[in-house]
Amino acid sequence: MTSTTRQPRYLGDNPRFLAGLFMSPAVIYIIALVGFPFVLAIIYAFTDISTGNPDLEFVGLATFRRVLADPVFRDSLWNTFLFAVVANVLVVILATALAEILIRDFKGKWLVRFLVLLPWVAPVSLATITWLWTLDSIFSPIDWLLRQAGLITENMYWLGRPGTAMTSVIAVQAWRIVPLAAVIVLAGLIAIPKDITDAVAVDGAGFWRRMFQVTIPLLAPIIAVAVLFGVILTISDMSVVYVLTRGGPTNSTQVLSTWAFIKGIEGGALAQGAAVALFLLPVLIGITAVVLRLARRREVL
Amino acid sequence: MPRRSPFVITRREFLYLSGAAALTAACGTGGSATTTTVPTTLAGTGAGTTAAPVEGGPEVSFVEPAEQLSGELKILLWSHFVPAHDSWFDPFAQEWGEMVGVDVTVDHIAVADVPAAIASEIQSGQPEHDLMQYIAVLSQHEPSVVDMADVVQEAENRYGTMLDLTRRSSFNPNTEKYYAYAPSWVPDPGDYRRSLWEAVGFPDGPASYDDLLQGGSEIFSSEGVQLGIGMSQEIDSNMALRGLLWSFGAGIQDENENVIINSDATIAAIEYMNELFAGAMTPEVFAWNAASNNQGLNSGELSYILNSISAYRTAQDEGLEVADDIFFTPALAGPETALVASHVMYNWIVPDAPDVNVAAAKEFLLHYTENLAPVAWNSKLYDFPAFPDRVPDLTGWIDSDPFGSNPADKLKVLNTSLDWATNIGHPGPANPAVGQIFGESIIPVMFAEAAQGAKSPQQAVEDAEAQINAIFDDWRGQGLVGGG
């Protein structure tokens, strides 16, 4: 007995056609809005193009040499590293704790879930402007509360001092990304087989032991994905830093994404802006490869 | 065979229906985009602020264009700090278009977004707008814009000589090209709270940087009210600190575009600022944005700022008590001179690209220049003319403010503003290197690093000098900056 494969009668019944059709918007979107500018940035970085002069004169690595010699670039590189690492450590801790809370049943759970997701669904510029007002040098409500509690006598000037400014941008970035990470970790928690948690409970493991010896090892691949998203979002996004501090004071919160914009667009040195923007690309690719590899290995184990 | 529900559709039907819906939506969108004309008075006024045009004032006059015009003229400009200006400007432009046969569209965007918008339009090679305006020099776009020499020449033939201040902010002496047309500008006086300064012996406000240090420190220690000269990475700090440098005999470049930032005069200016910060300011000046000093003055938290009259006009419009307490001073005297940068320097550019309606853009600028008196009036005396003869009543308006100042002669110091205002490249031209240094806020960072104690004044200057030299070298390599 032989089986025959029937050819679809209509184009709309052809799975290959449908697969291409449904994928095409995403592919067009990525090529037009990510791929094309990306290729353009690579080309620009090897020229001396400026915002006012679109002529492409190739200068080899001269633009990169100029960028590397710039002390603000070196500060931005360090700040980017600090910003990404500290913000994402906070994100992992807070997201795991939040997911542990959200998986339990309690009254008003839907409201808590809604409030938790709010920072992620709110437009980033709008949310950051709210923080700009909250951290205002004169009228900060945080300062008011601290003064009422007798903890400070003069304003904190959150965005006016290098240390508090960096703390502020890290905190706001973590606040923004925690909901996404929490949802990812929550999905991982839900996926843990119930027989494992039941067995652990029967064996009499306490909360901390269950957390560190069962839950976190099982969640590791999921947490790795959350970290990957968090790091990429932190390094590639300029909104929080640009709106809160524009890289100040004294470039102490300047990161590569804001410096690329200021150098390339506001300063007019488009080639140098492109070189700054591209600088972390190999690092990001490396991080992505390592994290995904680790996640896959944990899954296999 | 099971009967099919009328509410269930097959995958194929779903696709067909989706396609048809998408096609309909696309056609609908396209149709509305090409046929709907947005009234210019409502078109994108930034944050949605609208204001009634100012009552009275000079009539708009019209001069027949030299040649027959046609087509479209799309104008991009900032959302003016005095909203009444935009309520007047948009119909003004559209009415001109109706008279000369040009379809005019005006798009206002927030001032902070203008540089990126202009850069992207020029980079595209197919700019959306025929005429673009910004409130600071656009010298970096020189290779991609139309030479405005003929507009300047025609305007000078009609209205007399253009101010040297605006010429140096729109003309590159190295290439002998007008990369922009600058028909108006805005002075940058000191704004002070009379009640506070009177109490410490300066009823007319500080006249020198020594007065500022002495009086400002006394007010801060007795009243807890600081003064505000920004050291932040934003436009007002850039302007204010250049004024301080010039008044101390320092500067970024000389008249021949050689870098001169590393000088004893710069060190002296930084040391003065360190003292002023320690005695009369708080770290908030490191965190400011362009609106911060306005907000601080109007909320009664600052005794002195360097700004245009826009903060005061806002206080008036909102009926704030502080409005009657705000008065103005000219540039403060330093050891060498008394100078400040213009608060705003309007630069209008026309992209050098196919399909740009150059003739209409240039004719509109001449019409705008013809009407600099209504411009000044409708901006509530914020905008000043580059051709003073076009606004013969300006001195009288300033001496007796028609917009309700108390006392009426409160703005009179503005009548001397040409004596103490200069361009950002002073004593040289506002070239692309100067513009990039401005955009990257190298000067505010230099002052702030020393004031915070992160660097000695000498070290701060040397670090700034290294950055400035690199930028000048870049632009000299493109032939747009002289010296070296």
Image (tube, coloured by chain):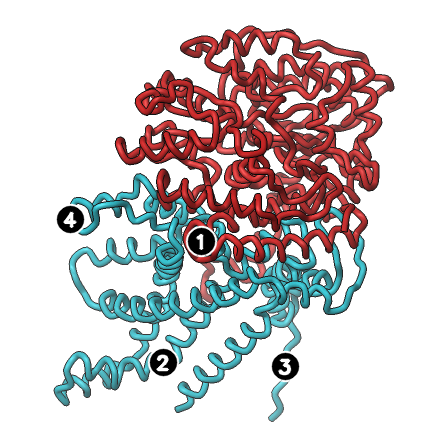
Chain colours: A cyan, B red
C-alpha gap between disc 3 and disc 4: 80 Å
Badge 2 is on which residue? A220
Tag shown at residue B296 = none
Q: Are marks 4 and 1 on the same chain?
A: yes
Residue type at mark 2 is: Ala
Q: In the figure, residue B229 lies in which quadrant?
A: top left
Residue type at mark 3 is: Thr
Q: Earlier in the sequence, mark 1 or mark 3?
A: 3
Q: Earlier in the sequence, mark 2 or mark 1?
A: 2
Q: Nearer the viewer, mark 1 or mark 3?
A: 1
Contact (CB < 8 A) between labels 2 and 1? no
Q: Earlier in the sequence, mark 4 or mark 1?
A: 4
Q: In the figure, residue B39 lies in which quadrant?
A: top right
Badge 4 is on which residue? A150
Contact (CB < 8 A) between labels 2 and 3? no
C-alpha gap between disc 2 and disc 1: 28 Å
Contact (CB < 8 A) between labels 1 and 3? no
